[in-house]
Image: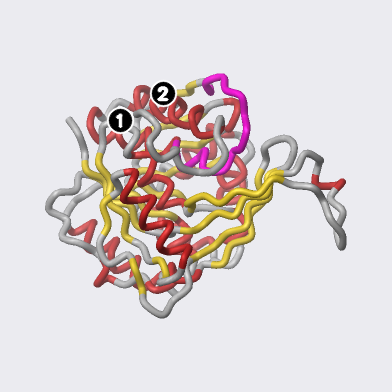
Amino acid sequence: MSVNVLCIGDVMLDVIARIDVSPQKINFGSDTASRISTNGGGAAGNVAAWLTRTSAKSTIVSHVGDDPAGAALIAEFDSLGVAHENLLTPGESSGVVVVLVDSSGERTMFPDKGANSNLTIADLPPLDNYQAVYISGYALLNPLSRPGVLAMIEKVRADSIPIYFDPASVGAMRDVSDKEIHQWFSMMNVLFLNEEESIFLTGLVDIERALDYLLEYSEVVVIKRGSQGAIAKARGYDSISVSAISATVVDTTGAGDSFAAGFIAAFASKHDLTAAMTAGTELAAQCVAIVGGRPRVGAAI
């Protein structure tokens, strides 16, 4: 069964600087040779984009500005097949993030949210045709968009549509209390985290104990482990692990987002946790093998 997924959150223009040296060898205050590219980004935008490379359909709920970056982002969504309404916000600047990718493929990000801060309940489309909703943590961690996104969550929950949530980054979570983040978790059906985020939120290094802790709030918890694959657990069941698929790592930007897209498309249609995790790792392997956080326009499914 093909599912229709509503993705709520951030859309950014990624300006990616790839360097061939370790961060310690950057010539701060001077020049360091790099290769620069621009790509569509933002967690919600990335998930929506990668969903088009599955059997699912996707719609993005976000904002871009009426500037060249916004025009490029809208054109990319159109080319990929991501549906959208009211994406353009006149008089605003689009969100932009500078992504530094070092010689190991690790990325460090410097974001400017721009028009993403303007999300309100009025941006939520009719929910009749959606079987799943993905929400990026960046949308809740941004205090300007938080009230609107919380109102959207209330409406989605009232319509009994499963919500998949990725809390985003440890750096951004430091500005919100643990109590508030846990309240958000209790509104979600499925949580996606990486190991750093799970340790930060639970205080537990033992991954099985971290899963059990988080399952007190949400029905299914998935912890992404990079090159070690992923582990997940549903309430009342044993944990399940899958290995990462071997790939030549070019850029890890968007790896977690592509995993989420593959997982959601599979889990929303079959409710098979192992199959969903396998689908996530397959899509993530495609993502890390290219520059940028989205599939290339025109690439085959």
- Point out the residue furthest to the left here: 128
- At 67% from the left and 49% from the top, the residue drawn is 17
Q: Amino acid at mark 2?
A: Thr
Q: Secondary structure at mark 1?
A: helix
The mark found on residue 266 in the picture is: 1
- At 44% from the left and 76% from the top, the residue drawn is 92
- Which region shows up in magenta? 244-258
The mark found on residue 278 in the picture is: 2
Where is residue 125? Give x, y as percent.
20, 62
Main secondary structure along the magenta-highlighted residues: loop
Answer left or right for 22 relative to 163. right
Pointer 1 with pointer 2, Cβ within 8 A: yes
- At 43% from the left and 59% from the top, the residue drawn is 10
- At 43% from the left and 47% from the top, the residue drawn is 46
Q: Secondary structure at mark 2?
A: helix
Counting other residues with Cα less than 10 Å from the Cα at mark 2, is it few (<14), some (14-19), or many (20 or more)? many
How is colour applied across the structure in the image?
secondary structure
Whether residue 162 is in magenta: the answer is no
Answer left or right for 76 relative to 125. right
Q: Amino acid at mark 1?
A: Ala
- Point out the residue furthest to the bottom here: 91
Residue 150 position (above or below residue 92): above
Residue 127 position (above or below residue 101): below
In this view, the residue in front, 19 or 71, is 71
In this view, the residue in front, 245 or 37, is 37
